[in-house]
Image (cartoon, helix red, strand yellow):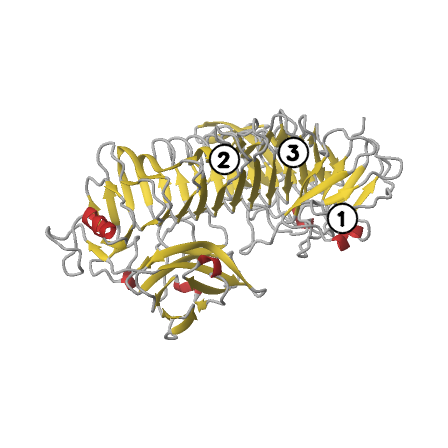
Amino acid sequence: MTDGRKCLALLGVALTITACGRFSAPSGAAGGGPGVIGDQGGAGHPSIGLVSIVPGEDRARVEWRFELAEGTPPPALFLHVAEDPAVLFDTPGTALVLEDGWTLVEGLTTDTPYWFGLSLDEGQGALPTGPILSARTSAPIYVDPSAPPGGDGSLAAPFNDLFPGILIAFVHGGGNVWSAEGTFEGASYGLLEGADLYGGFAADFALETRDPSQHETRLSGIGSNTLIALDASSVPAVIDGFTLEGSGASAAGVDCDTHPVELRRLTISGCSRAVKLRSVPPTETAIQIVRCTLGGSGVEGLSIDGAFHLTIEDCAFVANGQEGIDASDLIAPPGGKASLFVRDSRFADNVADGLDIDMAAPFTTGPGGKFKLVIEDCEFERNGGVGLLLDHDFETTPEWFARITVRGCRSRANAEAGMHFDLDGPGVTRIHRCRVDANGGDGLLISSEIHAGTMIAADCAFAGNQGFGVRGVEGQAGILLSHCVLQGNRLGGLEGGPGGALAVSSVAYLQPSPWIGGEHYASVQTNSAQTFARAATAYHKVTAIELGELVLSPPPTFGSGATLEVVEDDVARTALTVGADRVQVAPTIEPALPAILSAFAEPGPVQEDWTTPAGSPAQGGGMPPPSGPAPDAGPAGAPLGGSPGREELSPPPLFTFSGSSPSWNQAIAPAATLLLTFEGGDPDPSSLALGLDALDPAGVPLPIDPVVTSEGIELPAPPGGWQSGDLVRLHAALTSDAGDPLASPIALRLSVP
């Protein structure tokens, strides 16, 4: 960036954005691509967000990361700064150069809290992106582990230990402790109220060159001590830019007890738990974890117990002794809320589950609490249990309610199910544009107890799993699939279970037993290699590895030179030699067994392309609207379209069906009025004519008179009443009052005693 200075007038304060040199990511940075700061890294989806704010006396260094899909033009990027987070995005912001990766904001008022956020514009208006981070300006307190004893915390004479800096910040009612590179041996600190810690400086403490990946500030633990502990407080804290290494016996890298904190650009390993979070209800503690790697822990990477509003952005949870993240429990207080937002993060090679969240009510009485969980653009791979496990653990307190959205995620090669949702209590659960493949169990497993709720999967692909693609087991939760692909799953495509299931506008491809205990409507079953632009043409189970050869069941259906993929790892391999029941591949691989090998008919990439070429049996195979042509079956024909496993840089809003009362998968009275409910907006009454209809069992339209109310859509029974086999259909033409199309067109098959 070479265009000098740009000024921003905000809240009566003159701020200056200083021009900065271009940033280059270090070679091999996790997350991939230019602009990725440091070596933490997340899932590598298209994303942009802040990773660090480092404040001084009257200025702050602002750092961001970016990841763009290949060939995507960079969006316009804007920085917003405010003293009140409620008005942060009320002003246009100051333009940044995306590739710079950092900038200096000058002209700030000292001893003042500020909030920082980014927005991006891809040509349709600016939208906020990534986390909102905070910082409080103050004169820095300087610490350098290589400084001689006797320092006073000034730039000329830094302290040589963090504790005096923490103490001075506390005594002065708050302060920023800046630490130069080096190692603090035997580290164990209590972070006193008001002290914020920033590492990653060179010895000259220049903000312009601050970079934890180049100037590592290391805290080395000893014995079973916790490296940094935060006791109960309502004053937010910041820990930014450190490497925390436990002794192998260290209890925790960071132990936070009912204390709001932002953890940014941390790498933590060698502890029993990398981060331990506790919050005693009814206090709801706000936590942000951004651009951190929590790995190599004896137990969990992140342990959660209590009431939180927790944001996790661009983090990696890898190779932990149990779960990557374990919440036992995430608690919503009576009349209160608990929330979890996880974006662009990676959960890999953990001994147990990747991400395991139990949602629970406290052992008290009172008005019900609410949960909101959003998991976006994350990867769950090679975990020893389930990739993503979300559990309603409040079935005995039906006043509690959970909203779960999982979108743009991939769950691959986990030992058990790719995703398991245990929906015991009331709630809304939807997944969108997810890719779940090559898992040792089912792709998507749904269980429940007595609650007759609804789980919707839209625009998803379930491929090459050892169990079923989608499976419902005990309980009453109903499953609806919209524009999904069930491909090459070993036991079958859709196993409906006792709660019932219905696949609409979906494709079962290379799928033995595509619909077991589940129904399909306006869906396609095919083995044609012309179904998709690029997809595997055969699946084989890898049962053993003998002398470098993969032993397959069933035997190979391909010859030498064939293009192969193992455990859906996106690596194109070549069949060198092919025997009666085995194959030698290059490059070699030794997957955890059993595993899945997929074969492709033609050379080329092994990334699936689920668009429908001319002549595909999926073309026009979806649910026809009341007027106009039927859409394609599968993801290509979905209202929002797109490739499963990745969302857009600015994901569109999701307006979706969430359930009905009485529940669509339970027997209803002939004269019953159905209340259809929605998430992501209220239905637009003007869209009812083309967006909602009903058919009798013979496919003849029924005369219905739906009405939009404050709760959703009331659908009275047609003249003569409902009968078993009637079909209520919701189409993409049904829009929200904001104009968003129904993201998951579905059909409800009714049962009448």
What residue is shown with label 3?
Answer: 453
Whole-percent x and y of residue 109? 33, 65
Badge 2 density bin: few <14, some 14–19, many ≥20, Cα 10 Å? many
Q: Secondary structure at mark 3?
A: loop
Mark on residue 114? Answer: none
Foreground pick, 235 / 311: 235
Q: Which numbered disc, 1 or 3, marks the residue that appears first in the sequence?
A: 3
Query: What's the CA distance linking mark 1 and mark 2?
Result: 34 Å
Left or right of 249 in this view: 632: right
Whole-percent x and y of residue 420? 55, 32
Q: Amino acid at mark 3?
A: Gly
What residue is shown with label 2?
Answer: 387
Whole-percent x and y of residue 116? 41, 59
Q: Which quadrant is the C terminus positioned in?
A: top right
Mark on residue 620? Answer: 1
Of marks 1 and 2, the one in the foreground: 2
Q: Are marks 3 and 2 in contact (CB under 8 Å)?
A: no
Q: Which numbered disc, 1 or 2, marks the residue that appears first in the sequence?
A: 2
Q: Amino acid at mark 1?
A: Gly
Q: Does residue 151 appear in the picture of this structure?
A: yes
Q: Which numbered disc, 3 or 2, marks the residue that appears first in the sequence?
A: 2
Residue at the bottom extreme of this rendering:
4
Q: Secondary structure at mark 2?
A: loop
Foreground pick, 335 / 468: 335
Q: Amino acid at mark 2?
A: Gly
